[in-house]
Image (cartoon, rainbow, N blue to C red):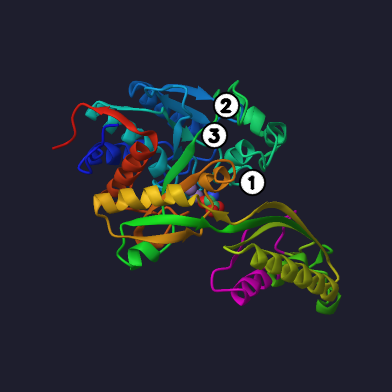
């Protein structure tokens, strides 16, 4: 098997240009990206991605949930492909790098292999997983969760957004509801490059994060029913104020997470007051909540503490609070062998690195339950993500893509390399 010299590098400018070219699809005035899954902007970037993969000699197919697979042939097509990639959908006020870096770095790795005339033993498959963000349709990492068998395709296709649009009809609208059954396509491993979305690498001046684990996540949908009444005539002691009760729930989630630190986190990111009016005591509202922790046992404690807090708030305030757990993703332990391959590629390339746990959820966390998987992190500015200020440097993105390239070559095996960058 031929070896590739560690000086084989991706084309940094080409990757950087691709990242900024795709940022046009859903560009926001503040320099971010709003590209909700299965919307018009997602179709634009999907079309761009398909054309780019085909131009790089890949065969592109789409599964029943719209996930895109671009296969570069290997010498032995009987071998399962090495899968690399991430997602191209973003948060409503997302950035240019979350998901995009990993997907376009996978494309760039293929382009670099083409430039170097590299033939690999096993095929390689770039993946663009549908709806990683979970913002428009729950849960997050939706398509990779279905691929891993956590949900049926029928269940996911029936999921609705806030306007009542189903996943199925959104896929049909953008023309990305493929015929391929979800999970039919098998891989021998999956590796995902992603920005850290946290502050550690930047603070420690590390270029690469070799990701060993991922936090567990619990998602809830909640409702609070009090009693709508006149803001001017309802005495304070007689109120059954859903919004005041909700404010205690928000602080309870924050306090519970702080009490189970140092790694546990808790967030309430959404609330909708039914028929809100400035001079009506709120009667009914809906909200979402989530907890995360690297330990399953801590997740159980977070869950129990929230149940107790909810019961206390409801009885004191004479409101009804319903909390439905809609998703629980157990903590991820990535495959030690693949993690070692990532670490080996990082050392070979000479980048400063540390091992790290992912605070964010990723498609690789779902795939890790059905195949060997691992992740590569690079820093993002001030650790900021899920914000239009999200930013990363070209040098760090290039380093991450080089580690992805060499990890992929190590896993796929190199049959021949016509030339490497001298
Ligand atoms: O929620 C997450 O951790 C991911 O960014 N969707
Ligand atoms: Mn992401
Ligand atoms: Mn994200």
> From where the camera sits, is residue 363 visible?
yes
Q: In which quarter of the image is residue 284?
A: bottom right
Give the number of the mark in front: 2 or 3. 2
Position above or below: 211 against 128: below
Q: Does the magenta stretch include residue 313?
A: no
Residue drawn 48% across the image and 29% down it: 80
Q: Position of residue 274 (x, y in %)?
A: 75, 54
Where disc 3 sits, the SS reads loop
Residue labelled with disc 3: 39
Position above or below: 151 against 208: above
Residue labelled with disc 1: 139
Q: Where is residue 20 in the image (x, y as percent from the top left)?
A: 32, 40
Whether disc 2's CB lies below 8 Å from ligand 2 is answered no
Would residue 413 appear left or right of 416 to someone viewing this image?
right
Earlier residue among tags 2 and 3? 3
Whether disc 3's CB lies below 8 Å from ligand 3 is answered no
The magenta region covers 249-278
Where disc 2 sits, the SS reads loop
Earlier residue among tags 1 and 3? 3
Between the residue at mark 1 and the residue at mark 3, the CA separation in whole angstroms equals: 17 Å
Give the number of the mark in front: 2 or 1. 2
Where disc 1 sits, the SS reads loop
Residue drawn 58% across the image and 68% down it: 264
Q: In which quarter of the image is the N terminus?
A: top left
Which class describes the residues within 10 Å of circle 2: few (<14), some (14-19), or many (20+)? many
Q: Which residue lies furthest to the bottom in this view?
A: 237
Q: On residue 419, which mark appears?
A: none
Residue labelled with disc 2: 63
Q: Position of residue 375 (x, y in %)?
A: 44, 49
């Amino acid at each position: 098997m031929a070896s590739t010299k560690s000086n084989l590098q991706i084309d940094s400018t080409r990757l950087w240009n691709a990242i900024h070219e795709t940022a046009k699809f859903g560009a926001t005035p503040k320099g971010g990206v709003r590209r909700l899954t299965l919307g018009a902007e997602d179709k634009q970037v999907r079309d761009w991605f398909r054309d780019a993969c085909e131009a790089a000699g890949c065969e592109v197919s789409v599964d029943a949930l719209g996930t895109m697979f671009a296969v570069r042939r290997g010498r032995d097509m009987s071998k399962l492909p090495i899968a690399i990639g991430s997602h191209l959908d973003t948060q409503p006020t997302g950035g240019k790098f979350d998901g995009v870096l990993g997907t376009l770095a996978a494309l760039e790795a293929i382009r670099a292999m083409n430039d170097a005339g590299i033939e690999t033993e096993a095929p390689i498959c770039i993946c663009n997983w549908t709806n990683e963000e979970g913002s428009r349709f729950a849960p997050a990492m939706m398509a990779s969760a279905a691929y891993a068998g956590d949900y049926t395709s029928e269940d996911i296709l029936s999921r609705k957004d806030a306007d009542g649009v189903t996943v199925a009809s959104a896929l049909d609208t953008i023309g990305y509801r493929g015929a391929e059954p979800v999970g039919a396509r098998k891989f021998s491993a999956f590796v995902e490059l992603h920005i850290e979305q946290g502050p550690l690498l930047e603070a420690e001046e590390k270029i690469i994060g070799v990701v060993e684990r991922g936090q567990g996540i619990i998602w809830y949908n909640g409702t609070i029913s009090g009693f709508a009444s006149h803001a001017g005539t309802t005495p304070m002691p007689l109120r059954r104020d859903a919004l005041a009760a909700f404010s205690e729930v928000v602080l309870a989630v924050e306090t519970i997470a702080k009490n189970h630190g140092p790694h546990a986190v808790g967030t309430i990111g959404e609330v909708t007051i039914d028929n809100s009016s400035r001079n009506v005591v709120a009667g009914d509202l809906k909200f979402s909540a989530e907890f995360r922790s690297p330990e399953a046992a801590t997740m159980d404690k977070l869950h129990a503490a929230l149940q107790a807090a909810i019961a206390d708030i409801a009885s004191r305030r004479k409101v009804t609070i319903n909390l439905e757990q809609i998703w629980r993703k157990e903590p991820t332990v990535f495959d030690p062998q693949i993690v070692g391959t990532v670490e080996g590629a990082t050392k070979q390339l000479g980048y400063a690195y540390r091992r790290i746990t992912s605070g964010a959820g990723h498609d690789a966390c779902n795939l890790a339950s059905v195949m060997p998987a691992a992740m590569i992190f690079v820093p993002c500015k001030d650790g900021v993500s899920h914000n239009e200020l999200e930013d990363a440097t070209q040098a760090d993105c290039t380093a991450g893509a080089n580690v992805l390239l060499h990890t992929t070559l190590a896993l796929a095996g190199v049959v021949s390399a016509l030339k490497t960058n001298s």
